[in-house]
């Protein structure tokens, strides 16, 4: 490998073991090979990194850190069907080829617990996001790209009062896990059952569907912090840049509206054929437990990972770990998961 050749690339998943022996994972945001003059970064300016250094966002809080490549190891590299790859053998110009099929497995943590499910196929994970920006969609015969998504969050107070906030308004609340609801590589998506904290002034623009005596009294205390529970989260509108129409005798020739709302949302479909290949650290999904799933504590899983790093040998967890999963699956368990 040449002295100035980068070891890690954008969206690589890396790890490090801290001085206290803690195992941490992060995502590469930038390496020294990025041309900051050509990179489109909006209003934020990207600084050129020194050779051998990378910018990493550490999971779960998203703190960003410039670190030398030799201080981390590669945990995962995202590949897609059609990518050109080659086996890296020092000093040899080895044969190149195309990726034809990608199989992804993930260890996922049950949100709000320290339980993880080992080696889950990405095909079985359902993303929490119904729609996402920059994803291709179709509506009847028309194909376009989502520019932005507007959603609504229904929240319930301890006395049963309920209200609606836009996703931007609800993002002013805090997640008890300490993860940010916005402006983070590992942002938290809203999901039913999620607990949020925030001052009453965050609800000044709320649409109240029911408001009882206890909550009504709290409205006078703007800085009083309250705990609420997400009961529903749904998309209210999409802004879509329509680009082309399939040749078909069915459907209207007229281009759909840029803003999609109401019942028209049911006609929009995501063209995310390779969704299972795009799974990344921190992604949130739902998953229904299966009888043969292997469940362990987060600490047990980290010990296995550290052992694999030190010995270079990965040991399959024993059958004893599968018992809790069998019981949960029998009960029809389904929950929100975060990819580790």
Image (tube, helix red, strand yellow):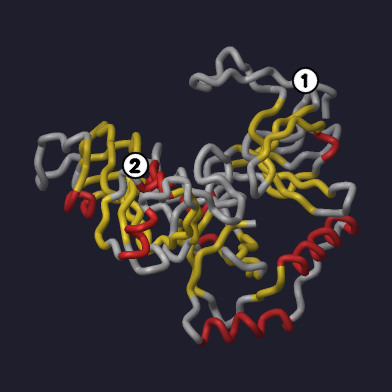
Sequence order check: which comes first, mark 1 or mark 2? 1
Regarding mark 2 in the picture, which secondary structure is present there? strand
Viewer-side residue, 205 vs 72: 205
Q: Residue at x 49, y 21 (%)?
A: 42
- 193 relative position to 217: left or right: right
Q: Quadrant of residue 94?
A: top right
Q: Position of residue 19 (x, y in %)?
A: 89, 47
Viewer-side residue, 221 vs 275: 221
234 lies above or below 16: below
Regarding mark 1 in the picture, which secondary structure is present there? loop
Q: Residue at x 32, y 55 (%)?
A: 234
Specify few, some or many for label 2: CA neighbours under 10 Å numbering under 14, 14-19, or 20 or more: some
107 lies above or below 23: below
Q: Quadrant of residue 74?
A: top right
Q: Tell me if I can see residue 185 in this picture.
A: yes
Q: Which residue is mark 2?
A: 149
Q: Position of residue 98 (x, y in %)?
A: 58, 42
Q: Which residue is mark 1?
A: 50
- 203 relative position to 180: left or right: left
Q: Are marks 1 and 2 in contact (CB under 8 Å)?
A: no
- Quadrant including the C terminus: bottom right
Q: Which mark identifies residue 252?
A: none
Q: Tell me if I can see residue 101 in this picture.
A: no
- Quadrant including the N terminus: top right
Q: Residue at x 70, y 73 (%)?
A: 296
What is the distance, in whole Å, between disc 1 and disc 2 at their CAs? 37 Å
Viewer-side residue, 318 vs 104: 318
Q: Nearer the viewer, mark 1 or mark 2?
A: 2
Q: Position of residue 207 (x, y in %)?
A: 26, 51
Q: Residue at x 61, y 80 (%)?
A: 325
Q: Quadrant of residue 144?
A: top left
Number of dots carrying numbers? 2
């Amino acid at each position: 490998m040449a002295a100035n050749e980068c070891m890690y690339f954008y969206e690589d998943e890396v790890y490090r073991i801290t001085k206290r022996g803690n195992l941490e994972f992060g995502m590469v945001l930038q390496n020294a090979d990025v041309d900051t003059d050509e990179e489109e970064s909006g209003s934020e300016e990207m600084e050129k990194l020194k050779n051998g250094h990378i910018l990493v966002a550490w999971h779960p809080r998203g703190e960003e850190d410039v670190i030398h490549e030799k201080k981390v190891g590669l945990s995962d590299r995202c590949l897609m069907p059609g990518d050109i790859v080659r086996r890296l053998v020092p000093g040899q110009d080895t044969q190149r080829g195309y990726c034809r099929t990608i199989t992804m497995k993930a260890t996922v943590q049950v949100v709000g617990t320290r339980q993880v499910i080992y080696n889950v196929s990405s095909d079985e994970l359902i993303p929490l996001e119904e729609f996402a920006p920059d994803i291709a969609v179709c509506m009847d015969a028309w194909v376009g790209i989502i520019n932005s998504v507007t959603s609504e969050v229904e929240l319930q107070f301890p006395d049963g009062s309920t209200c609606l906030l836009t996703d931007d308004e609800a993002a002013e609340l805090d997640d008890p896990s300490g993860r940010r609801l916005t402006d983070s590589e590992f942002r938290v998506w809203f999901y039913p059952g999620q607990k949020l904290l925030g001052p009453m002034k965050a609800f000044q623009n709320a649409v109240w569907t029911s408001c009882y005596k206890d909550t009504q009294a709290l409205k006078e205390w703007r800085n009083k912090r309250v705990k609420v529970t997400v009961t529903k989260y749904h998309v209210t509108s999409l802004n879509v840049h329509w680009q082309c129409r399939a040749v078909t005798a069915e459907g209207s020739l007229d281009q759909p509206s840029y803003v999609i709302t109401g019942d028209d949302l049911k006609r929009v479909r995501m063209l995310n054929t390779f969704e299972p290949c795009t799974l990344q650290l921190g992604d949130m999904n739902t998953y229904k437990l299966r009888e043969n799933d292997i469940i362990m504590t987060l600490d047990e899983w980290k010990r296995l990972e550290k052992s694999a790093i030190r010995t270079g040998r990965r040991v399959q967890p024993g059958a004893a770990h599968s018992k809790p999963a069998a019981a949960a699956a029998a009960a029809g368990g389904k929950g929100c998961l975060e990819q580790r």
